[in-house]
Image (cartoon, rainbow, N blue to C red):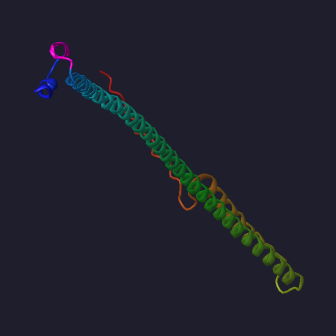
C-alpha cells in the first residue's frame, strides 16, 4: 500500500505519511521511494524540455543549413547565368568576327580580281607594243585597242568601287544594301 500511495502522492502527503509512520525500517523505504518519485518527476519534466531544447537547436541548425544551401544555390545559379551570358556574348563576338573575316576575305578577292584585270591589261599593252614595233599592226590600231582596254579597266574599277562604297552591305559581303523607302508625303487638308 505504501508503494501504491507513493506513486500519486504530493509532497505534503509524503511528509504526513513519514511523520505518522513509526520509526522502523519502512522510513528509509518511504524516503527512497519519494526520492525515486521526485527523480522520475524531475526526469519527466526535464527530459521533454531537453528534447525541446535539442529540437530547437536542431531546427536552428537545419534552418542555417537550408539558408546556406539556398545561398549556395543562388550563387551557383548566378554563376551559371553569368557563364551563359558570357558564352552568348562570346558567341556573338565570334559570329561577328567571322562576318568581319568573311567581309575582308571577299574584299581581298575583289581586289585580286581587279589586279588580275590590270595585269592582263599590261600584258596586252606589251603584246600590242611588240606588234606595233614589229610593224604587224599600225600604231593607231594599237593605241585604239589600248585606249579601249583602258576604258574597260577604268569602268571595272569604278563599278567595283562604287558598288562596294555605296551598294554593298557593310555587315554581309554578299548582300546588297537597299535604302528604305522615303515616307509618303501627305498633304494636310485645310479646313
Q: Quadrant of the C terminus?
A: top left
Q: Residue furthest right?
A: 133
Q: Nearer the viewer, residue 47 or 24?
A: 24
Residue 185 within the segment the image draws in magenta: no
Residue 148, image x and y in percent? Answer: 73, 70
Q: Nearer the viewer, residue 102 or 30?
A: 30
Res 92 seen here: yes
Residue 68, image x and y in percent? Answer: 45, 38
The magenta stretch spans which residues?
11-23
User: Which residue sits at x=65%, y=61%?
Assistant: 160
Q: Quadrant of the N terminus?
A: top left
Residue 105, image x and y in percent? Answer: 66, 64
User: Which residue sits at x=20%, y=14%?
Assistant: 15
Q: Quadrant of residue 31 in the image?
A: top left
Q: Residue furthest left?
A: 1
- Left or right: 93 in relation to 68: right
Q: Nearer the viewer, residue 167 or 173?
A: 173
Residue 132, image x and y in percent? Answer: 86, 81
Res 138 seen here: no
- Residue 127 to residue 43: above or below: below
- Residue 145 to residue 170: above or below: below
- Left or right: 87 in relation to 40: right
Q: Quadrant of residue 60 in the image?
A: top left
- Left or right: 29 in relation to 133: left
Q: Main secondary structure of the magenta part?
A: helix
Amino acid at each position: 500500500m505504501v508503494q501504491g500511495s507513493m506513486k500519486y502522492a504530493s509532497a505534503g502527503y509524503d511528509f504526513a505519511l513519514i511523520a505518522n509512520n513509526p520509526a522502523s525500517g519502512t522510513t528509509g523505504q518511504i524516503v527512497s521511494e519519494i526520492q525515486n518519485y521526485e527523480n522520475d518527476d524531475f526526469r519527466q519534466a526535464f527530459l521533454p524540455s531537453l528534447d525541446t531544447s535539442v529540437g530547437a537547436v536542431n531546427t536552428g541548425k537545419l534552418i542555417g543549413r537550408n539558408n546556406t544551401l539556398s545561398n549556395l544555390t543562388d550563387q551557383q545559379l548566378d554563376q551559371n547565368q553569368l557563364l551563359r551570358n558570357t558564352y552568348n556574348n562570346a558567341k556573338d563576338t565570334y559570329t561577328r568576327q567571322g562576318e568581319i573575316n568573311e567581309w575582308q576575305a571577299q574584299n581581298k578577292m575583289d581586289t585580286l580580281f581587279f589586279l588580275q584585270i590590270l595585269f592582263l591589261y599590261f600584258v596586252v599593252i606589251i603584246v600590242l607594243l611588240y606588234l606595233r614595233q614589229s610593224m604587224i599592226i599600225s600604231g593607231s590600231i594599237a593605241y585604239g585597242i589600248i585606249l579601249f582596254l583602258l576604258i574597260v579597266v577604268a569602268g571595272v574599277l569604278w563599278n567595283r568601287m562604287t558598288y562596294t562604297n555605296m551598294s554593298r552591305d557593310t555587315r554581309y559581303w554578299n548582300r546588297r544594301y537597299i535604302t528604305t523607302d522615303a515616307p509618303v508625303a501627305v498633304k494636310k487638308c485645310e479646313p
